[in-house]
Amino acid sequence: MGNILVTGGAGQIGTELIPYLRARFGPERVVATGHRKKPAAAILAAGPFLALDVRDRDALAGAVVRHDVETIYHLAGVLSAVGEANPQLAWDVNMNGLYNVLEVARGHGCAVFFPSSIAAFGPGSPLDDTPQVTVQRPQTIYGIAKLSGELLCDYYHHHYGVDARGIRYPGLISHQALPGGGTTDYAVDIFYAALREKKYTCFLHPATRLDMMYMPDAIRAAIEIMEVDATRLRHRNAYNVTAMSFTPAELAAAIRRHIPEFVVDYTVDPLRQAIADSWPDQMDDSAARSQWGWCPEYDLERMTSDMLQALSVKLAIPFSL
Ligand code: SER
Protein backbone atom coordinates (compact mmCIF):
# COMPACT_ATOMS: atom_id res chain seq x y z
CA MET A 1 0.00 0.00 0.00
CA GLY A 2 1.35 3.46 -0.93
CA ASN A 3 1.62 6.52 1.25
CA ILE A 4 -0.17 9.87 1.57
CA LEU A 5 1.27 13.35 1.01
CA VAL A 6 -0.45 16.48 2.31
CA THR A 7 0.40 19.96 0.97
CA GLY A 8 -0.40 23.00 3.10
CA GLY A 9 0.44 21.08 6.26
CA ALA A 10 0.52 24.20 8.44
CA GLY A 11 -2.86 25.47 7.27
CA GLN A 12 -6.26 25.39 8.89
CA ILE A 13 -7.29 22.05 7.36
CA GLY A 14 -3.85 20.39 7.20
CA THR A 15 -3.24 20.95 10.91
CA GLU A 16 -6.18 18.66 11.70
CA LEU A 17 -6.23 16.37 8.68
CA ILE A 18 -2.62 15.16 9.11
CA PRO A 19 -3.04 13.85 12.70
CA TYR A 20 -6.33 12.25 11.68
CA LEU A 21 -4.75 10.47 8.70
CA ARG A 22 -1.76 9.41 10.81
CA ALA A 23 -4.00 7.96 13.51
CA ARG A 24 -5.87 6.03 10.84
CA PHE A 25 -3.05 4.82 8.58
CA GLY A 26 0.08 5.07 10.74
CA PRO A 27 2.33 8.11 11.28
CA GLU A 28 5.04 6.99 8.87
CA ARG A 29 2.59 6.69 5.98
CA VAL A 30 1.54 10.37 6.01
CA VAL A 31 4.07 12.91 4.73
CA ALA A 32 3.32 16.45 5.90
CA THR A 33 4.64 19.26 3.71
CA GLY A 34 4.65 23.03 4.11
CA HIS A 35 6.26 26.07 2.58
CA ARG A 36 5.83 29.49 4.21
CA LYS A 37 4.95 28.23 7.70
CA LYS A 38 6.09 25.08 9.44
CA PRO A 39 3.35 22.77 10.70
CA ALA A 40 2.61 22.49 14.43
CA ALA A 41 5.35 20.94 16.59
CA ALA A 42 3.20 17.87 17.25
CA ILE A 43 2.95 17.22 13.49
CA LEU A 44 6.71 17.66 13.03
CA ALA A 45 7.41 15.27 15.91
CA ALA A 46 4.95 12.56 14.93
CA GLY A 47 5.93 11.70 11.35
CA PRO A 48 7.72 12.72 8.15
CA PHE A 49 7.84 16.38 7.12
CA LEU A 50 9.23 18.03 3.98
CA ALA A 51 9.67 21.72 3.23
CA LEU A 52 7.97 21.97 -0.16
CA ASP A 53 6.72 24.80 -2.38
CA VAL A 54 3.92 23.42 -4.56
CA ARG A 55 5.17 25.65 -7.39
CA ASP A 56 8.31 23.48 -7.57
CA ARG A 57 7.17 20.51 -9.63
CA ASP A 58 10.50 18.68 -9.56
CA ALA A 59 10.61 18.83 -5.77
CA LEU A 60 7.04 17.56 -5.59
CA ALA A 61 7.76 14.72 -8.01
CA GLY A 62 10.90 13.80 -6.04
CA ALA A 63 8.92 13.65 -2.80
CA VAL A 64 6.24 11.47 -4.40
CA VAL A 65 8.84 9.00 -5.69
CA ARG A 66 10.98 8.93 -2.53
CA HIS A 67 8.01 8.42 -0.23
CA ASP A 68 6.08 6.07 -2.50
CA VAL A 69 3.04 8.38 -2.46
CA GLU A 70 -0.27 7.13 -3.85
CA THR A 71 -2.64 9.86 -2.62
CA ILE A 72 -2.09 13.65 -2.47
CA TYR A 73 -4.34 15.84 -0.33
CA HIS A 74 -3.58 19.18 -1.98
CA LEU A 75 -4.47 21.82 0.62
CA ALA A 76 -1.88 24.54 -0.07
CA GLY A 77 -3.50 27.74 -1.25
CA VAL A 78 -3.99 31.47 -0.77
CA LEU A 79 -7.42 32.43 0.65
CA SER A 80 -9.89 34.97 -0.72
CA ALA A 81 -9.03 38.25 1.04
CA VAL A 82 -5.26 37.76 0.75
CA GLY A 83 -5.84 36.74 -2.87
CA GLU A 84 -7.56 40.05 -3.66
CA ALA A 85 -4.60 41.90 -2.12
CA ASN A 86 -2.18 39.93 -4.32
CA PRO A 87 -3.99 38.31 -7.26
CA GLN A 88 -0.77 37.36 -9.06
CA LEU A 89 0.48 35.41 -6.06
CA ALA A 90 -2.93 33.76 -5.58
CA TRP A 91 -3.02 32.60 -9.20
CA ASP A 92 0.57 31.39 -9.09
CA VAL A 93 0.18 29.36 -5.91
CA ASN A 94 -3.40 28.17 -6.37
CA MET A 95 -3.35 27.39 -10.09
CA ASN A 96 0.25 26.43 -10.81
CA GLY A 97 0.36 24.49 -7.54
CA LEU A 98 -2.66 22.42 -8.58
CA TYR A 99 -1.34 21.99 -12.13
CA ASN A 100 1.92 20.61 -10.70
CA VAL A 101 0.06 18.26 -8.36
CA LEU A 102 -2.05 16.93 -11.25
CA GLU A 103 0.97 16.54 -13.54
CA VAL A 104 2.87 14.63 -10.85
CA ALA A 105 -0.25 12.55 -10.16
CA ARG A 106 -0.51 11.77 -13.89
CA GLY A 107 3.10 10.68 -14.06
CA HIS A 108 3.11 8.61 -10.89
CA GLY A 109 -0.42 7.24 -10.65
CA CYS A 110 -1.55 9.20 -7.58
CA ALA A 111 -5.10 10.00 -6.49
CA VAL A 112 -5.74 13.69 -5.71
CA PHE A 113 -8.05 15.41 -3.22
CA PHE A 114 -8.91 18.99 -4.25
CA PRO A 115 -10.67 21.35 -1.82
CA SER A 116 -12.89 23.68 -3.82
CA SER A 117 -15.09 26.23 -2.08
CA ILE A 118 -18.31 28.24 -1.92
CA ALA A 119 -16.05 30.82 -3.57
CA ALA A 120 -16.38 28.91 -6.87
CA PHE A 121 -19.85 30.49 -7.13
CA GLY A 122 -20.52 34.17 -7.69
CA PRO A 123 -23.01 36.75 -8.89
CA GLY A 124 -25.45 34.99 -11.19
CA SER A 125 -25.41 31.76 -9.16
CA PRO A 126 -28.55 31.12 -7.10
CA LEU A 127 -27.23 31.86 -3.60
CA ASP A 128 -29.96 30.08 -1.66
CA ASP A 129 -29.95 26.30 -2.02
CA THR A 130 -27.17 26.68 -4.59
CA PRO A 131 -27.49 23.66 -6.92
CA GLN A 132 -24.69 21.18 -7.54
CA VAL A 133 -24.68 22.18 -11.21
CA THR A 134 -25.47 25.83 -11.94
CA VAL A 135 -24.06 29.12 -13.24
CA GLN A 136 -20.55 29.71 -11.85
CA ARG A 137 -19.08 33.15 -12.55
CA PRO A 138 -16.91 33.91 -9.49
CA GLN A 139 -15.36 37.37 -9.33
CA THR A 140 -12.50 36.83 -6.85
CA ILE A 141 -9.18 35.49 -8.08
CA TYR A 142 -9.50 32.82 -5.37
CA GLY A 143 -12.90 31.73 -6.71
CA ILE A 144 -11.72 31.84 -10.30
CA ALA A 145 -8.79 29.57 -9.37
CA LYS A 146 -11.14 27.21 -7.49
CA LEU A 147 -13.52 26.93 -10.44
CA SER A 148 -10.61 26.53 -12.88
CA GLY A 149 -9.22 23.91 -10.49
CA GLU A 150 -12.47 21.96 -10.55
CA LEU A 151 -12.39 21.92 -14.35
CA LEU A 152 -8.71 21.01 -14.47
CA CYS A 153 -9.25 18.11 -12.05
CA ASP A 154 -12.09 16.81 -14.20
CA TYR A 155 -9.90 17.20 -17.30
CA TYR A 156 -7.14 15.11 -15.74
CA HIS A 157 -9.69 12.52 -14.73
CA HIS A 158 -11.29 12.25 -18.16
CA HIS A 159 -8.13 12.47 -20.25
CA TYR A 160 -5.54 10.77 -18.11
CA GLY A 161 -7.54 8.69 -15.66
CA VAL A 162 -6.21 10.60 -12.63
CA ASP A 163 -8.46 9.76 -9.69
CA ALA A 164 -9.10 13.41 -8.74
CA ARG A 165 -12.00 14.10 -6.37
CA GLY A 166 -13.12 17.34 -4.78
CA ILE A 167 -15.61 19.01 -2.51
CA ARG A 168 -16.80 22.60 -2.27
CA TYR A 169 -16.21 23.57 1.33
CA PRO A 170 -18.25 26.25 3.02
CA GLY A 171 -16.49 28.55 5.52
CA LEU A 172 -14.57 26.34 7.96
CA ILE A 173 -14.61 26.86 11.72
CA SER A 174 -11.87 25.34 13.86
CA HIS A 175 -9.86 25.89 17.02
CA GLN A 176 -6.42 24.48 16.19
CA ALA A 177 -4.99 26.64 13.40
CA LEU A 178 -6.27 30.01 12.21
CA PRO A 179 -7.61 30.28 8.64
CA GLY A 180 -5.38 33.19 7.63
CA GLY A 181 -6.84 35.62 5.16
CA GLY A 182 -10.33 34.48 4.16
CA THR A 183 -13.74 36.12 4.14
CA THR A 184 -15.32 33.58 6.47
CA ASP A 185 -12.55 34.06 9.10
CA TYR A 186 -14.88 36.15 11.27
CA ALA A 187 -16.62 32.94 12.34
CA VAL A 188 -13.34 31.76 13.90
CA ASP A 189 -12.06 35.12 15.21
CA ILE A 190 -15.32 35.75 17.05
CA PHE A 191 -14.74 32.77 19.37
CA TYR A 192 -11.26 33.96 20.42
CA ALA A 193 -12.64 37.45 21.08
CA ALA A 194 -15.67 36.12 22.99
CA LEU A 195 -13.45 34.22 25.41
CA ARG A 196 -10.65 36.78 25.69
CA GLU A 197 -12.36 40.19 25.56
CA LYS A 198 -16.09 39.41 25.71
CA LYS A 199 -16.47 41.73 22.74
CA TYR A 200 -15.83 41.54 19.00
CA THR A 201 -15.88 43.93 16.05
CA CYS A 202 -17.16 42.03 13.02
CA PHE A 203 -16.05 42.99 9.50
CA LEU A 204 -19.26 41.66 7.90
CA HIS A 205 -22.77 43.09 8.22
CA PRO A 206 -24.84 41.33 10.94
CA ALA A 207 -27.30 39.88 8.38
CA THR A 208 -24.69 38.33 6.05
CA ARG A 209 -25.74 34.70 5.74
CA LEU A 210 -23.04 32.23 4.74
CA ASP A 211 -22.66 28.50 4.49
CA MET A 212 -20.39 27.07 7.23
CA MET A 213 -18.94 23.81 8.56
CA TYR A 214 -17.08 22.67 11.68
CA MET A 215 -13.66 21.12 11.10
CA PRO A 216 -14.42 17.56 12.29
CA ASP A 217 -17.09 17.35 9.58
CA ALA A 218 -14.71 18.89 7.02
CA ILE A 219 -12.04 16.28 7.77
CA ARG A 220 -14.53 13.44 7.56
CA ALA A 221 -15.87 14.75 4.23
CA ALA A 222 -12.36 14.75 2.72
CA ILE A 223 -11.61 11.22 3.81
CA GLU A 224 -15.04 9.83 2.92
CA ILE A 225 -14.97 11.12 -0.63
CA MET A 226 -11.48 9.71 -1.16
CA GLU A 227 -12.51 6.30 0.15
CA VAL A 228 -15.86 5.79 -1.54
CA ASP A 229 -16.09 3.39 -4.48
CA ALA A 230 -15.44 5.47 -7.61
CA THR A 231 -18.47 4.02 -9.40
CA ARG A 232 -20.72 6.01 -7.03
CA LEU A 233 -19.31 9.41 -8.06
CA ARG A 234 -21.14 11.14 -10.89
CA HIS A 235 -19.68 14.64 -10.42
CA ARG A 236 -16.16 14.34 -8.96
CA ASN A 237 -15.11 18.01 -9.07
CA ALA A 238 -16.49 19.21 -6.98
CA TYR A 239 -19.33 18.20 -4.63
CA ASN A 240 -21.31 20.77 -2.63
CA VAL A 241 -21.13 19.86 1.07
CA THR A 242 -22.75 21.83 3.85
CA ALA A 243 -23.52 21.59 7.54
CA MET A 244 -24.99 24.88 8.81
CA SER A 245 -25.85 28.36 7.62
CA PHE A 246 -25.88 31.46 9.83
CA THR A 247 -25.34 35.22 9.99
CA PRO A 248 -22.89 37.02 12.30
CA ALA A 249 -25.88 38.12 14.42
CA GLU A 250 -27.06 34.50 14.77
CA LEU A 251 -23.57 33.27 15.65
CA ALA A 252 -23.22 36.04 18.25
CA ALA A 253 -26.57 34.99 19.75
CA ALA A 254 -25.44 31.35 19.91
CA ILE A 255 -22.26 32.40 21.75
CA ARG A 256 -24.26 34.68 24.05
CA ARG A 257 -26.24 31.67 25.25
CA HIS A 258 -22.95 30.59 26.92
CA ILE A 259 -21.37 34.01 27.55
CA PRO A 260 -24.31 36.39 28.21
CA GLU A 261 -22.12 39.51 28.53
CA PHE A 262 -20.61 39.03 25.03
CA VAL A 263 -21.15 42.07 22.78
CA VAL A 264 -20.56 42.46 19.03
CA ASP A 265 -20.34 45.62 17.00
CA TYR A 266 -19.91 45.95 13.26
CA THR A 267 -17.35 47.83 11.17
CA VAL A 268 -17.97 46.53 7.69
CA ASP A 269 -14.97 45.93 5.41
CA PRO A 270 -16.34 46.71 1.91
CA LEU A 271 -13.99 44.26 0.17
CA ARG A 272 -14.88 41.24 2.28
CA GLN A 273 -18.55 42.26 2.44
CA ALA A 274 -18.73 42.30 -1.37
CA ILE A 275 -17.06 38.89 -1.49
CA ALA A 276 -19.44 37.45 1.11
CA ASP A 277 -22.46 38.88 -0.70
CA SER A 278 -21.43 36.97 -3.84
CA TRP A 279 -21.17 33.57 -2.06
CA PRO A 280 -23.91 31.03 -1.29
CA ASP A 281 -26.04 31.36 1.84
CA GLN A 282 -26.41 27.61 1.73
CA MET A 283 -25.53 25.06 -0.93
CA ASP A 284 -27.73 22.15 -1.91
CA ASP A 285 -25.59 19.13 -1.01
CA SER A 286 -28.11 16.44 -1.95
CA ALA A 287 -25.76 15.01 -4.63
CA ALA A 288 -23.05 14.37 -2.00
CA ARG A 289 -25.64 12.92 0.37
CA SER A 290 -27.14 10.52 -2.15
CA GLN A 291 -23.99 9.55 -4.07
CA TRP A 292 -21.47 9.02 -1.30
CA GLY A 293 -23.42 9.25 1.92
CA TRP A 294 -22.36 12.71 3.12
CA CYS A 295 -24.00 13.63 6.44
CA PRO A 296 -22.75 16.42 8.76
CA GLU A 297 -22.71 15.93 12.55
CA TYR A 298 -22.35 19.51 13.80
CA ASP A 299 -25.03 22.21 13.66
CA LEU A 300 -24.65 25.76 15.00
CA GLU A 301 -25.43 24.88 18.62
CA ARG A 302 -23.19 21.84 18.82
CA MET A 303 -20.31 23.56 17.02
CA THR A 304 -20.57 26.62 19.28
CA SER A 305 -20.38 24.68 22.54
CA ASP A 306 -17.55 22.48 21.26
CA MET A 307 -15.55 25.51 20.01
CA LEU A 308 -15.96 27.39 23.30
CA GLN A 309 -14.95 24.37 25.33
CA ALA A 310 -11.90 23.49 23.20
CA LEU A 311 -10.71 27.09 22.87
CA SER A 312 -11.08 27.79 26.58
CA VAL A 313 -8.70 24.89 27.24
CA LYS A 314 -6.27 26.10 24.56
CA LEU A 315 -6.31 29.71 25.83
CA ALA A 316 -6.43 28.66 29.51
CA ILE A 317 -9.52 30.82 30.08
CA PRO A 318 -11.99 29.45 32.64
CA PHE A 319 -15.30 28.52 31.01
CA SER A 320 -18.03 26.04 31.73
CA LEU A 321 -20.99 25.09 29.59
N1 SER B 1 -12.96 30.23 3.73
C1 SER B 1 -12.53 30.68 2.43
C2 SER B 1 -12.31 32.13 2.41
O1 SER B 1 -13.00 32.82 3.13
C3 SER B 1 -13.52 30.31 1.39
O2 SER B 1 -13.26 29.07 0.89
O3 SER B 1 -11.51 32.60 1.67
Image: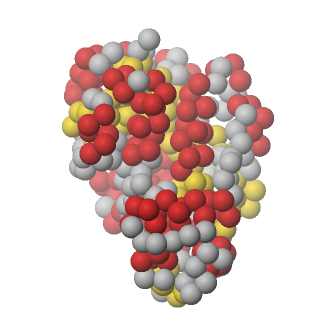
- Spot occupied by residue 59 in the image (x, y as percentages of width and height): 22, 28
The residue drawn where x is 48% and y is 83% is: 198
The residue drawn where x is 56% and y is 28% is: 226
Q: Describe residue 177's horizontal placement relative to residue 296 as left or right.
A: left
Q: Is residue 159 visible?
A: no
The residue drawn where x is 26% and y is 39% is: 44
- Spot occupied by residue 61 in the image (x, y as percentages of width and height): 28, 23
Q: Which of 220 and 121 is in front in this view?
A: 220
Q: Nearer the viewer, residue 300 or 7?
A: 300
The residue drawn where x is 40% and y is 61% is: 314
Looking at the image, is 50 positioned above or below residue 127?
Answer: above
- Spot occupied by residue 85 in the image (x, y as percentages of width and height): 33, 66
Q: Which of 71 and 98 is in front in this view?
A: 71
Q: Can residue 145 be seen in this view?
A: yes
Q: Describe residue 137's horizontal placement relative to residue 59 as left or right.
A: right
- The image quadrant that residue 317 belongs to is bottom left
- Spot occupied by residue 116 in the image (x, y as percentages of width and height): 53, 45
Q: Describe residue 209's horizontal placement relative to residue 46 as left or right.
A: right
Look at the image and tell me in which quarter the N terminus lies: top left
Look at the image and tell me in which quarter the C terminus lies: bottom right
